Every structure is written in structure tokens, then in C-alpha cells.
Image (cartoon, rainbow, N blue to C red):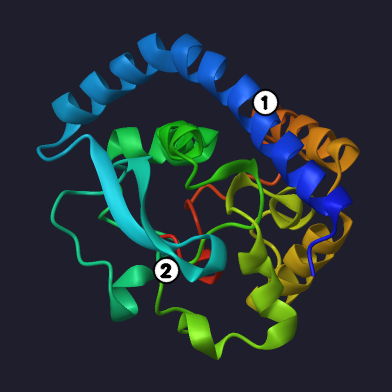
Amino acid sequence: MCTPERRGYERLHRSLDLLLSVPLLLMMAPLMGVLGLAIRLDSPGAVVFRQERLGRHGRRFTILKFRSMTSGIRTDGKHLFVKEVDARITRVGKFLRSTSLDELPQLINVVRGEMSLVGPRPPVPWWPHEYLDYPAAAAVRFTVRPGITGYSQVIARNDAGWPARLEHDSWYVQHRSVRLYGWILWRTLFRVASREGIDRRGPTPVRGDPS
């Protein structure tokens, strides 16, 4: 049951998302334009990659990312997985993945209300579980908006397996606060700036993020 205190925090969390994401999106617009041009010149196809994901309460939405793979790739079944050396990743895509700049378009998802700056990463609808098949302890992650970054990402990056990530997500949902929100953002900036824990291959199969 959602208490008045928790409802108050949810409103504050959303306000913080808008307060930070709108100026950041405007500030990053020139860089995003340059990156979009680089993607288009590097390989044919759309600049932005779109994929269906599970959001709050299991609602499906389209996540936005800069395309880092060749156009027209399949993203179902075994094609979801990214290999250590994967010919589908473009030259610009390799840079985007290593710097996490491929995530910048998700600021639009945040402004739309589909995502938060901080929260569990949104899985694809069918992997590792269908929405209704998530165990109760793991399904708690769907009570909040998914995030561009999250607790699991800053403490484990790509090193944790899926069960561990679900535990991290559940812990975050139970303990979320303004202080934790700020700490996760700070740790994210540090890890991106220092490239600490960056997986040079890009997102792993565990994250269910093929591009």
C-alpha cells in the first residue's frame, strides 16, 4: 500500500527528474546533433534505435537510444546477445557504447514520463521473463519508473548476473530517497567520466539491451 509519505516522495522524484532532465536535454542538444550526424555518416540507417521495453506497472513503451549497430539487425532470440567481438557494432557505435553517450536520447523518455533518471533498467517484454512471470520479489521493480541509470548499474555495472540485479533493484525500490537518488547520479557521473567498470563490448545479454 502506498502511504501518503511515499506518494509525496514519488511526486518529488518526478519533479527532480523534470528539473534536471529538461535543462540537460537542452544543454546536450548540440552534442546530440553532432553525434547524430556522425552516426549517419558512419553507416546507413536511422540515427535513433527504438525498442519496446517494460515500464512502470508493466506498461510497454519505446525506449530511445543512439544506434550503435548496423541498421536492420534482429533483436529477438539469440540476436539479443552481444558478443565480445561483434561485427554488428559500428565504429561510432563502439565509441558511443564505451562512453554511454548512446543513452542520451532516453532523456526524452524521462521528459515524457516513461522513464526516470534513476531507477531499475527496463527489460525487454519477453526476456528474461514475461511480465506476469516475474516472481513477486522481483516484480517490485515495476512499481517505479525504470531509469537511465540505477543502483545496480553503479555498484556492479555489467559484472552482476540477472538474479543479483533483481536483488539490487528490489533493495533500491524499498530504500529509495532523495539522498539515494543524488548518490546514484553522482556515482553514475563518476563512473562515466572515469570509465570505471565500462564494458567496452557494450551492454551485456543480462541487461537485455541489444543496441
Residue 176 position (above or below residue 196): below
Which residue occupies 67% across, 67% down?
A: 141
Q: Earlier in the sequence, mark 1 or mark 2?
A: 2
Q: Is residue 112 left or right of residue 13?
A: left
User: Residue 184's mark?
Assistant: none
Q: Position of residue 77 (x, y in %)?
A: 31, 80
Which residue occupies 69% across, 78% down?
A: 138
Determine the image quadrant of residue 12: top right
Q: Which residue is mark 2?
A: 124
Which residue occupies 85% across, 37% down?
A: 178
User: Residue 193's mark?
Assistant: 1
Q: Secondary structure at mark 1?
A: helix
Which residue occupies 50% across, 56% down?
A: 203
Residue 196 visible? The answer is: no
Q: Nearer the viewer, residue 88 or 143?
A: 143
Q: Residue furthest front?
A: 4
Disc nearest the viewer among 1 and 2? 2
Q: Position of residue 54 (x, y in %)?
A: 46, 65
Work out which quarter of the rendered image holds the N terminus and state it: bottom right
Residue 185 visible? The answer is: yes
Q: Nearer the viewer, residue 176 or 84?
A: 176
Q: Position of residue 126 (x, y in %)?
A: 40, 79
Label 1 Cα neighbours within 10 Å, binned few <14 / some 14-19 / many ≥20? few
